[in-house]
Image (cartoon, rainbow, N blue to C red):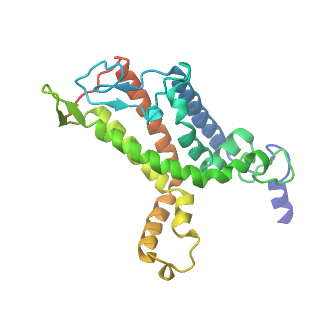
Amino acid sequence: MATEIAAAHAYGLGKTARGDSWWAGPLATALGLGGFVVYSTFRAIYNGGYEFGHGAQIPVDSAHAYLLSPFYSPLIILPWLPAWISPAFLILWAPGGFRMTCYYYRKAYYRAFFLDPPACAVGESRKNYRGETRLFLFQNLHRYFLYFALIFLVILAIDTVHACLWPTADGGLTFGVSVGTLMLAANTTLLSIYTFSCHSLRHLLGGNIDCFSCVALGQARHKMWQGISRLNKNHMLWAWVSLFMVGFTDFYIWMVASGRITDARIF
């Protein structure tokens, strides 16, 4: 038995006793994450098609509620910056850093891009475990990126409210909902679930407590910890669904702003 286990964990890239398609997971992860990185980088460099409606700098339709891409929210326009610096670059580092240092994403891209290791019981190229040292020490910043992520959730919620305010003929505003409104609301909701299922947030609320009844607000913290723990069971799911949704929401607003599609008002 000891010999079989040693063979399954033999050193050498790709060496394994597994007979299944262990490479399918890392490959799908590489394609998914790689595709999102390419798209989001392109959209940031593109520097256009990120807002639409009443209040936009170049309103194609000033009678429409304001839609703002989550890649550019909050929209920061600094006149003294060179024109080639997209507003997206001023804010994407925060949500990007939160995902890059996420405990789930670390496992995902270590396997997919660094083959470290490629999969469970599959050999890698090195023999010694070095951990997250040197360059990868920045992963310890995850908790601080979490604070930024919580702030961004509030900003995105405000963007959703703006998408519900439609200008009237007399200069006022009225409540309304379009497909774009629903897109922004769904994006904010999924990002919130992903953020609130975070391992670091779970630890902040209860991971360092041995006795909830012995600390201030112990009952409330215990209930929140239980709720986050339930969400945390599907953290991987929320990570992928929210990633897809934020990209699709940006794409939808881009298509609306470019005039390729019309954002239909539901009521």
Residue found at x 70% / y 45%:
110
Q: Quadrant of the C terminus?
A: top left
* Residue at 45% from the left image edge and 37% from the top image edge: 246
**x then y, percent, for residue 84:** 56, 19
Determine whether 100 is above or below 225 in the image. above
Pick the front one: 179 or 164: 164
Depicted 259 relative to depicted 241: above or below:
above
Taking 75 as reference, is 256 left or right? Answer: left
Q: Viewer-proximal residue, 57 or 117?
A: 57
Determine the residue positioned at 53% across, 80% down.
211
Is residue 230 positioned above or below 88 on the image? Answer: below
Furthest residue in direction bottom, as rendered: 214
Q: Is residue 185 visible?
A: no
In the displayed image of the protein, which residue is found farthest to the left?
A: 170
**Picture quarter with the N terminus:** bottom right
- Residue at point 82%, 60% (across, down): 4
Q: Position of residue 89 (x, y in %)?
A: 55, 31
**Where is residue 153 shown, x and y percent of the image?**
43, 47
Q: Is residue 162 above or below residue 2?
A: above
Image coordinates of residue 208 in percent, x first then y, are: 59, 71
Name the one closer to the observer, 36 or 153: 153
Question: Quick check: 245 left or right of 124?
Answer: left
Circle count: 0
69 left or right of 63 in image: right
Q: Is residue 3 left or right of residue 66?
A: right
Residue 134 appears in the picture as rendered: yes
